[in-house]
Image (tube, rainbow, N blue to C red):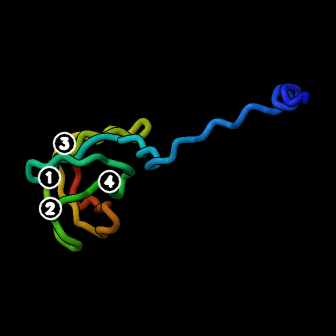
Amino acid sequence: MFDFLKTASRKPPARAVPRGRPAEPQSKGTVKIDRHVFNVRELNRKGFILQPYDRDVIITGQRFRFEIDAQDGDDVYKGRAEAVVTKVVDGALAAAFLTKFF
């Protein structure tokens, strides 16, 4: 008989959070390898991690030359250098610097 009282006292339903892919981490810059441009996910003085890495341009253990334009805090990395691939896993590539930027 007094059903309208029950509906008025209910809390509104919680909003559903859309489920999708998690947000991609912020890019710290770009690396260009053989005309292919990749986003830099992590970067420090020893090397970098590219993600997403979806090409078969280079393999683990291979030395390669690249152009970098990135920034990590106060450190600016811009120029050409040489690195070696340390790991390629789950759409990411890790590399260690071999030479300084020129």
Element type at mark 3: strand
Callout in the foreground (3, 2): 2
Front residue of this view, candidates 7 and 24: 7
Residue bearing mark 3: 79
Q: Amino acid at mark 1?
A: Ile
Crowding at mark 3 (Cα within 10 Å: few <14, some 14-19, many 20+):
some
Callout in the foreground (1, 4): 4
Residue bearing mark 1: 33
Residue extending farthest to the left is 35
Q: Is residue 73 above or below residue 21?
A: above
Q: CA distance from mark 1 to mark 4?
A: 13 Å
Q: CA distance from mark 1 to mark 2?
A: 8 Å
Q: Are marks 1 and 4 in contact (CB under 8 Å)?
A: no
Q: Nearer the N terminus, badge 1 or badge 4?
A: 1
Residue bearing mark 4: 51
Left or right of 40 on screen, residue 59:
left
Q: Are marks 1 and 2 in contact (CB under 8 Å)?
A: yes
Q: Amino acid at mark 3?
A: Gly
Q: Quadrant of the C terminus?
A: top left
Q: CA distance from mark 1 to mark 3?
A: 12 Å
Q: Amino acid at mark 2?
A: Phe
Where residue 83 sits: x, y (%)?
22, 61
Element type at mark 1: strand
Q: Is residue 18 above or below residue 61?
A: above
Left or right of 73 on screen, residue 33:
left
Q: Nearer the N terminus, badge 4 or badge 2?
A: 4
Crowding at mark 4 (Cα within 10 Å: few <14, some 14-19, many 20+):
many
Q: CA distance from mark 4 to mark 3?
A: 20 Å
Q: Is residue 93 above or below residue 76?
A: below
Q: CA distance from mark 4 to mark 2?
A: 17 Å
Q: Which label was assigned to residue 88?
A: none
Left or right of 64 on screen, residue 98:
right
